[in-house]
Image: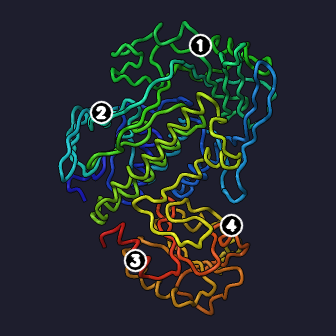
Amino acid sequence: MNPHGTDVLVVGAGPVGLTAAAELRRRGVACRIVDRLPARLPYAKAVGIQPRTLEVWDRMGLVRDVLDVAVPMRGQLIWVNGEEQERIDLFLPPEVPYGFAALPQYETERILEEHLARFGTRIERSTELVSFTQDAEGVTARLTGPDGDEEVRVRYLVGCDGAHSTVRKGLGLAFEGGAFPEEYMLADVRVGWDLPYGYGVRSMHRDAAGRVDDVLVCIPLPGPGRYRMSMVVPPELAAGAVRQGGDGKGDGNGDGVAHGLGGGRAPELHHIQAVLDRLSPRPVTATNMRWSSVFRISHRIVDRYGDGRVFVAGDAAHIHPPTGAQGMNTGIQDAWNLAWKLAPAVAGRARPGLTDSYDAERRPVGEEVVGRTVRHAAEGVQADPEDPSTLMMREAQLLVGYRGGPLAGSTPADGDGPGAGDRAPDCGGLLGEIATQPLRLFDLLREREHVLLLYADDAQAPCVPELAELIGGLPEGRLAAYAVLSEGGTAPAGAAALPVYRDGRGEFGRLYGVGKPTAFVVRPDGYLGARIQPPTAGAVAAYLAGIYRD
């Protein structure tokens, strides 16, 4: 550990930075998180919560707090030139534990900030990263805050500081892409229409050539009749009319990245009402506007997600259209992927290359998201002619995976279910010897590091004590393990070497595609690290040896 008291400095206290800091602190890493803003902004910017992010929050132990305040997203209602189109309903397979949701970003940040505070860490507000240098042993960062300038020495630096990232610029990372010419305005308002609860609204006008020349998009928020609305900006609020950045492109940062909220004149309620008068599917009056802004959209991605001991995540690494609510969710998963790898690196227990796998795994995900959202923004979701169920799973981010990546072991050829690098699906109906109600698999995975799941017919099979002996020799908390008995499996006679659960409804066997004894190693971020058949302690140890030094 760092003798100066801080092992990791996280720059930026949005959802991405808070996720990184919370996961580091949960693992006992000494971490500071700083943000240049004096307080959390009351803006409903990113509002869409994907099912995969809810799975992340389940694993982190905070999903209940989200479910208490979020709004279900059930689908979208579409109008074109005043005519109602076919309703889009959001659907997922029944074994997926969470649906789509909406939550204003300020609520997401509040929940994550309170979760972080449980580990004794709070955001250092009005504190900005000015510069940094790194060497083979660590990073020296210069901060400026309410008490003046400070120099801090840390092992690692994580930049979650947005589209105009100081960390990205300090690393000299390329950030190639472009900007959309259109500008939009956002507003958090209340309306009194009678449209179905939990549905977004998209109302468009097409000109004689079929091009969309006017659009209104409304996403439900907590509270009666409250929506986050986005629409094309009127000429008098356009960037060129009210503000100019240092590069003349209206971004105000002099870095050529025209993305995010504008700093000029904010839309007023009459600007919002004018669009509703043109496009609302019902005659309606907007009231109680909490916040509004003009924003620009760019699409860019870095050439690498880190260099040495410094990393970037979220908007610091990739920006793109808000189509499908992919941005914040992708960033949260960036942070989650990085945090579990940094923890053993800080402790000196990680194999060389573990932190390098962050770029290898997450940059392809970022590239796919940027490309897909740009296509969908220009052509609609029909730009990707997938079957509806696949499209829905992809938008839910449930198809993200790392097959063929540096941490993915081999997958037996006869397995029909998920392989190494795939998401570990949830299932229900697990029956224990003590709990009187069936459990979900995610109940066993929650707040764990690596978890070994041994699927077998007999809890007394020779591989069970062999694996139990391996686990007993590992550092505490390194690997939890459970035996999952097949539906017709033999119950243990007396104390078993591993905790035993019966696959009471056959869901584990079906969803994991197994019919014979198999071991699954689930990574801390909920992906399969290895699928081992037949299960042996040697194969499990070999997988862990690729992650940890000891």
Q: Position of residue 317 (x, y in %)?
A: 40, 39
Q: CA distance from mark 4 to mark 2?
A: 46 Å
Of labels 4 and 1, earlier in sequence is 1
Q: Label 3 belongs to which residue?
A: 541
Q: Nearer the viewer, residue 306 or 223?
A: 306
- Under circle 1, the secondary element is loop
Q: Label 4 belongs to which residue?
A: 428
At 37% from the left and 13% from the top, the residue drawn is: 248
At 35% from the left and 72% from the top, the residue drawn is: 545
Can residue 434 be seen from the camera position used here? no
- Under circle 2, the secondary element is helix
- Residue type pointed to by label 3: Ala
Q: Label 1 belongs to which residue?
A: 268
Q: Position of residue 282 (x, y in %)?
A: 80, 20
- Residue type pointed to by label 1: Glu
Disc sitting over residue 169 in the figure: 2
Q: Nearer the viewer, residue 61 or 492?
A: 492
Q: Nearer the viewer, residue 38 or 472?
A: 472
Depth-wise, is mark 1 or mark 3 nearer the camera?
A: 3
- Under circle 4, the secondary element is loop
The crowd level at tag 1 (other Cα within 10 Å; few <14, some 14-19, many 20+) is few
